[in-house]
Amino acid sequence: MFDYRQWILENLETVVLVLIGLLVLALFFFIINTVRLNQLHRRYRQLMRGVDKSNLEELIFKQAEELKNLREKVSQVQDVQEQVQQEIRRSLGPIGVIRYNAFDDVGSDLSFSVSILNREKNGIVLTSLYGREDSRIYAKPIVNGESQYKMTEEEKQAVSIAVQNAAK
């Protein structure tokens, strides 16, 4: 049978050196863990700075609740913004105006065509024809930049100007 006591006594120097090496290695790991623990403790103190008698769990739940409320508010703002965008598209906006002389015997450009459209190119074109004896006003509906009624060149120009103004 192997006598380990005898072997230890014969190799005492080697055993002592191995034990010293293990002790140094253990000391080295202890120092590393102490440094890491101090860093972790410092980070913990930074995290808890400004917290009044509440624990970290309560703080996280409060932050989660605030985040949920903010998401709901953002969603509401997005809904309102979409409604406003739709109203802007439907509202009257760009106009086009053309003044011209409708009749040769009348001086100056007293006749006109005005096109009033929304962003979807829907609206009206108003035309006033001024003459010496009388003045007439015509209105034509515009859908998608076109009218179901025959338009004069001046009315087409007024609609074209309004469409160009809508694109700006």
Image (tube, rainbow, N blue to C red):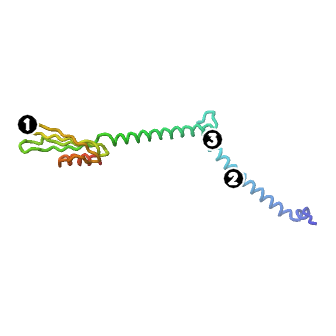
Do the residues bearing badges 3 and 1 touch, measured as CB atoms within 8 Å? no
CA gap between label 1 and label 2 equals: 105 Å
Determine crowd level at label 3: few under 14, some 14-19, many 20+ residues with C-alpha closer than 10 A.
few
The picture quadrant where one finds residue 19 is bottom right
Q: Residue furthest top?
A: 53
User: If you read the primary sequence from the N terminus, does the residue marked by circle 3 or circle 1 appear first?
Assistant: 3
Q: Mark 2 points at which residue?
A: 32
Q: Name the residue under label 3.
A: 45
Q: Is residue 16 left or right of residue 105?
A: right
Residue visible at 18% across and 40% down?
Answer: 138
CA gap between label 2 and label 3 equals: 20 Å
Give the residue type at disc 2.
Ile
Give the residue type at disc 3.
Arg
The picture quadrant where one finds residue 100 is top left
| Position of the N terminus by quadrant | bottom right
User: If you read the primary sequence from the N terminus, does the residue marked by circle 1 or circle 2 appear first?
Assistant: 2
CA gap between label 3 and label 1 equals: 92 Å
Indicate the secondary structure of the residue bearing disc 3: helix
Q: Which residue lies furthest to the bottom in this view?
A: 1
The picture quadrant where one finds residue 101 is top left
Q: Mark 1 points at which residue?
A: 133
Indicate the secondary structure of the residue bearing disc 1: loop
155 and 57: which is toward the camera: 155
Which marked residue is nearer to the observer: mark 2 or mark 3? 3
Indicate the secondary structure of the residue bearing disc 2: helix
User: If you read the primary sequence from the N terminus, does the residue marked by circle 2 or circle 3 appear first?
Assistant: 2
